[in-house]
């Protein structure tokens, strides 16, 4: 049984949505004589009904053995709906049982961003597969710019290789689906060399975990042993700091073994702890500076239609393209109200104007021949091309797909 079907006139129908995703009501398909609905996977005829759990869905009158939707277990069916519900409750558009145009993957739940672009697949995986199969199936989504999170009810070897969550289903009325493995935090208190540090599981409602993943409050982390889990960027950075401090401590221990004085070793240890405190304070200052920069550029984001959450990725692509440190100036009326980009040594004062981000196409009539125009997507490129009155250099640096292209507009 599945949640989706295809109507010859209405198109795709989603039983988990109040309007079925096409502006219709459940009563328009349930127990309607002559209703023609087909399975989106095998194209066989399906019918609308309500399960014993009061869940609307579609079923095959004759179950085909090779149709995955027709042969899903009840647990898989319920978990899919819970994942879609969690994504929608977190404020995202989520669709069930969506296949790629080339049909090389089918997502149990496909989540879209605020511009209607798919960016995350949530997969209820309750059957066995090998770690290599898990990696292969995850990689199938990559060409379409999709990340994947796999969700299961029991521990399996493949979970060590790909981003995943282990959940418990409710056993009593009023309980929620709970994540008990797959989300971790790094415990290191107090932050000294003698204090024990370890990764511990975060037990939380499934809805919270899905919301954190979709909003990128937590991201995938790969340990030195190749294990993969979800964690907050601050915890990942803290583990790096701990590893650095431990490396320094090991170096000190080797020095002691070689015959250095105990007093000298203690001085090194105290210095390592001071550096740790300084690095933590520095990281906080960098984050504060980052937030201030995003606030400063808020007006430009609105003007250019750029999402502030991907601006850092765009900046990394600009830095990679220039090979130098990148500094943003102000929006320049003399350059079509575009954002000025300067490049130069990170610690030096020498900076030169290297490009302009998203200038008004109407200002391109007298554009400097050697000044590069930077845009974040093909839409901006099309606007620039349509308005060009002289030769232009345009760098298309897409922070969503991480793909770059350099175009000369004649």
Image (cartoon, rainbow, N blue to C red):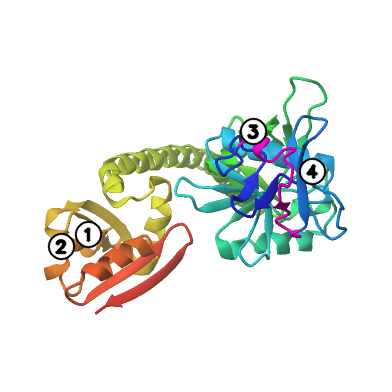
Mark 3 lies on a secondary structure that is helix
Which numbered marker is on residue 207? 3
How far, Cα to Cα, is label 1 from label 3? 41 Å
Q: Quick check: marks 4 and 3 in contact, CB under 8 Å?
A: no
N-terminal label among 2 and 4: 4
**What residue do we see at 27% from left, 59% from top?**
357
Which numbered marker is on residue 363? 2
**What residue do we see at 20% from left, 64% from top?**
352
Q: Quick check: marks 1 and 3 in contact, CB under 8 Å?
A: no
Which numbered marker is on residue 76? 4
Q: Residues within 10 Å of mark 4 (few under 14, many from 20)?
A: some
**What residue do we see at 37% from left, 64% from top?**
378
The residue most toward the front is: 33
Does the magenta segment cover residue 247?
A: no
The mark lying in front, picked from 1 and 4, is: 4
**In the depicted view, which residue is nearer to us: 322 or 308?**
308
Where is residue 205 drawn, in percent x and y?
Answer: 68, 30
N-terminal label among 4 and 3: 4
Numbered range of the magenta stretch = 25-43
- For label 1, the residue is 359
Instruction: Quadrant for residue 15, please give it.
Output: top right
N-terminal label among 1 and 4: 4
How far, Cα to Cα, is label 4 from label 3? 17 Å
Where is residue 409 drawn, in percent x and y?
Answer: 27, 76
Mark 2 lies on a secondary structure that is helix
How far, Cα to Cα, is label 2 from label 3? 48 Å
């Amino acid at each position: 049984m599945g949640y989706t079907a295809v109507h010859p006139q209405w198109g795709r129908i989603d039983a988990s949505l109040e309007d079925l995703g096409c502006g219709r009501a459940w009563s328009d398909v349930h127990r309607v004589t002559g209703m023609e609905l087909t399975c989106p996977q095998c194209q066989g005829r399906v019918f609308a009904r309500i399960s014993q759990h009061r869940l609307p869905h579609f079923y095959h009158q004759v179950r085909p053995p090779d149709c995955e939707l027709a042969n899903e277990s009840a647990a898989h069916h319920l978990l899919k709906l819970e994942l879609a519900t969690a994504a929608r409750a977190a404020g995202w558009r989520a669709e069930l049982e969506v296949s790629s145009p080339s049909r090389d993957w089918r997502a149990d739940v496909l989540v879209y961003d605020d511009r209607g672009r798919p960016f995350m697949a949530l997969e209820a995986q309750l059957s066995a597969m090998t770690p290599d199969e898990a990696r292969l199936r995850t990689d199938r989504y990559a060409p379409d710019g999709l990340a994947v999170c796999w969700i299961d009810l029991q521990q399996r070897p493949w979970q060590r290789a790909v981003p995943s969550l282990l959940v418990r289903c409710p056993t009593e009325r009023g309980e929620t689906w709970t994540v008990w493995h797959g989300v971790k935090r790094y415990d290191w208190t107090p932050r000294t060399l003698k204090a024990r540090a370890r990764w511990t599981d975060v037990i939380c409602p499934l809805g919270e975990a899905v919301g954190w993943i979709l909003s990128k409050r937590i991201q995938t982390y790969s340990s030195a042993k190749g294990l993969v889990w979800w964690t907050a960027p601050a915890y990942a950075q803290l583990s790096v700091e701990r590893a650095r401090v431990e490396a320094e401590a090991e170096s000190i221990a080797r020095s002691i073994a070689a015959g250095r004085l105990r007093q000298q070793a203690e001085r090194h240890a105290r210095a390592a702890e001071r550096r740790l405190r300084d690095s933590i304070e520095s990281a906080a200052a960098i984050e504060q500076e980052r937030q201030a920069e995003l606030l400063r550029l808020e007006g430009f984001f609105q003007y250019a239609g750029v999402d502030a959450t991907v601006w850092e990725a765009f900046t990394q692509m600009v830095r990679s393209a220039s090979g130098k440190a990148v500094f943003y100036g102000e929006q320049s009326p003399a350059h079509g109200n575009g954002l000025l980009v300067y490049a130069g040594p990170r610690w030096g004062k020498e900076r030169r104007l290297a490009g302009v981000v998203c200038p008004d196409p109407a200002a391109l009539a007298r554009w400097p021949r050697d000044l590069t125009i930077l845009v974040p997507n093909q839409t901006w490129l099309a606007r620039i091309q349509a308005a060009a009155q002289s030769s232009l250099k345009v760098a298309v640096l897409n922070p969503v797909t991480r793909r770059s292209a350099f175009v000369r507009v004649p």
